Amino acid sequence: MEALPVLLPSAKMAAGEKRRPLVASAANYADGGRPSVSRSAAAAESEEDFLRQVGVTEMLRAALLKVLEARPEEPIAFLAHYFENMGLRSPANGGAGEPPGQLLLQQQRLGRALWYLRLAHHSQRTAFNNNVSVAYECLSASGRKKKPGLDGRTYSELLKRICRDGGAPEEVVAPLLHKIQCRDHEAVPLDVFRTGMLTCFVLLEFMARARALFQLLEDPGLAVADRRVGQAVLDTLEEALGTSDQATAPVCYLEAGSRLGPDSLAVAMDRAAGGRRPSLPMARQEFLEKAVGLFIAKVKPVS
């Protein structure tokens, strides 16, 4: 019977604990006495931190910026290609496939660099320069036995690929490549790389405009032009390019050619066609080679 007074208060306390609302549970407080965040909020914050730590947030941001720069007709397909080749940018993959797969890896990197270079037209200066820098990084990734950097062999191969894929005949662009190529084992800095890429893309556009110009001269049935007229147009083009002798950027030569107005062309063509002596025909290839030769003569060689 003496134990009863001791047991009664314990029973009352237990009953009181059951009736007390669970608003001040110690589990819901942090060490500083502040209420802790909910599990869902903590999970969301943890997931966001994870995405930042592994670089996904920055990668998605970069991808969206590329979409805004390029403004492709099919953004989803554009993003698919972008993410498909993202792994080739990582220097950690540089040693994959050595030695039997080294050639394949190099071709993959060249393809990836070309993809970046074609994302924006060279007239979009900021976007084009950014893409050139990324392409340079793709090709400069180091393998297990190589130091990071771009050699002349890879640089020259990329120049040839740009011209070949752009439909430029090898014999036409050979003099240009001779001017801007580097030695196989020579280190290629970013500024030389950028100038070489820009020169090739400008050359391709210059050739396209030269083809369009020849179409105005040629006989539709014979696909040739009067030689006197063709040469007169080339001489006028050379005069237009001569106004940019002090220019250093290849795009200036393209702009100079664009200033070849219809009036000056018409005068040159009328003057040439006014001759009484018969003239030999000029084929498209000859006209193209001479026009491109005028452009290449203005390009400064890599020092």
Image (cartoon, helix red, strand yellow):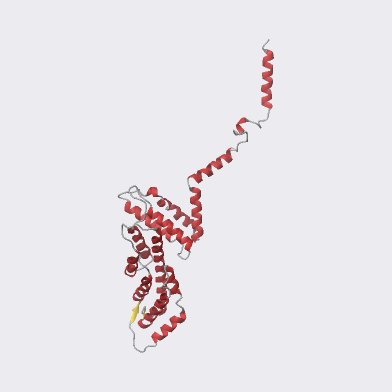
Quadrant containing the N terminus in the rendered view? top right
Work out whether residue 80 or residue 137 is closer to the camera in this orientation and state it. 137
Work out whether residue 43 or residue 187 is closer to the camera in this orientation and state it. 187
Figure quadrant of residue 252: bottom left
Locate residue 187, reporting x and y percent.
34, 57
Q: Is residue 220 visible?
A: no
Locate residue 278, reporting x and y percent.
34, 87
Which residue, as the protein is rendered here, is positioned at the far top? 1
Say which residue appears at 55% left-offset and 42% top-offset: 45
Figure quadrant of residue 165: bottom left
Quadrant containing the C terminus in the rendered view? bottom left
Whether residue 34 sits left or right of residue 109 in the image: it is right
Which residue, as the protein is rendered here, is positioned at the far bottom? 276
146, above or below 163, in the image: above
Locate residue 268, reporting x and y percent.
41, 83
Say which residue appears at 43% left-offset and 52% top-offset: 86
Q: Is residue 227 visible?
A: yes
Say which residue appears at 41% left-offset and 83% top-offset: 269
Q: How many marks?
A: 0
Locate residue 88, reporting x and y percent.
40, 52
